[in-house]
Image (tube, rainbow, N blue to C red):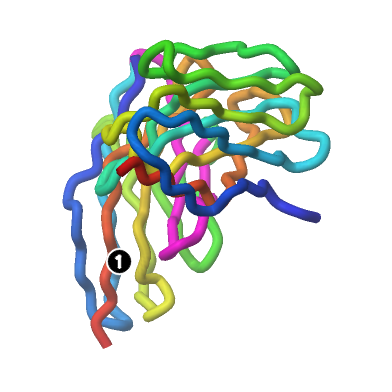
Amino acid sequence: AQSVTQLGSHVSVSEGALVLLRCNYSSSVPPYLFWYVQYPNQGLQLLLKYTSAATLVKGINGFEAEFKKSETSFHLTKPSAHMSDAAEYFCAVLTGANNLFFGTGTRLTVIP
Amino acid sequence: GAGVSQTPSNKVTEKGKYVELRCDPISGHTALYWYRQSLGQGPEFLIYFQGTGAADDSGLPNDRFFAVRPEGSVSTLKIQRTERGDSAVYLCASSLSPGSTDTQYFGPGTRLTVL
């Protein structure tokens, strides 16, 4: 069965600093991995997805993630945090049954 | 075009009552999913439709929960004899077709509170 684990339920960074949100996966088959963002009182929005093409995936709003099979990781990064990046971020893996298994989320706070 | 819409946005009910939550997927999307998000948790899968039929309902917690999609578009999640533990945000998503690379687009959710 596929699953993901997000390390760190809360992350705080200063405006302009590097954002690093961690996600590790467990899967017996090549996984399809996703990062979603949830702004307050809004629905989940797809940031990016890995579907076994390039290991470095670029998404919206300057975010990117690198698939590392040797580390079973799919960490989300952004070189320079902006105040508007403050939100809840979810890592997810597509299960064999075509539904998404989500991590518990990481709340990102950006300090001015 | 329009995204996934869900109604109502908020629902407050009393323990033991029956509730219906509605989802309007993106036009043309054949796959529709229901998830439940409890406070401080990630969304958890409930049920997935391909067209009119439930392709996978393994996430429904018990037989008080039921969902339909009679015409392959709008879906209704039905909860009987609600319990306080059912309080959560219920999310609906749709995708063009069920597949590994098709993005699931989420609606804003219905916040259910059972008193």
Asked if residue B34 lies left or right of residue A93, the reply is: right
**Can you tell which quarter of the image residue B64 is in?**
top left
Q: Residue A49: say if magenta.
A: yes
Asked if residue A73 lies left or right of residue B96, the reply is: left
**Can you tell which quarter of the image residue A78 is in?**
bottom left
User: Which residue in the protein does label 1 denote?
Assistant: A19
| Chain name for mark 1 | A
Residue A45 location in percent, x, y? 53, 53
In the depicted view, which residue is nearer to us: B101 or B112?
B112
Viewer can see residue A58 = no
Residue under the point 67% across and 34% down? B95
Residue under the point 77% across and 30% down? B73
Q: Which segment did they paint magenta?
A: A28-50
> In the rendered view, would you say A91 is above or below B31?
below
Question: Which type of secondary structure does the marked residue at label 1 adopt?
Answer: strand
> In the rendered view, would you say A53 is above or below A90?
above
Q: Quadrant of the C terminus of chain A?
A: bottom left
Q: Quadrant of the N terminus of chain A?
A: top left
Mark 1 crowdedness (10 Å alpha carbons): few <14, some 14-19, many ≥20: many
> In the rendered view, would you say A88 is above or below B38?
below
Q: Residue A65: say if magenta.
A: no
Residue under the point 66% across and 49% down? B5
Residue B100 location in percent, x, y? 59, 25
Residue under the point 42% across and 48% down? B12
In the depicted view, which residue is nearer to us: A32 or B78?
B78
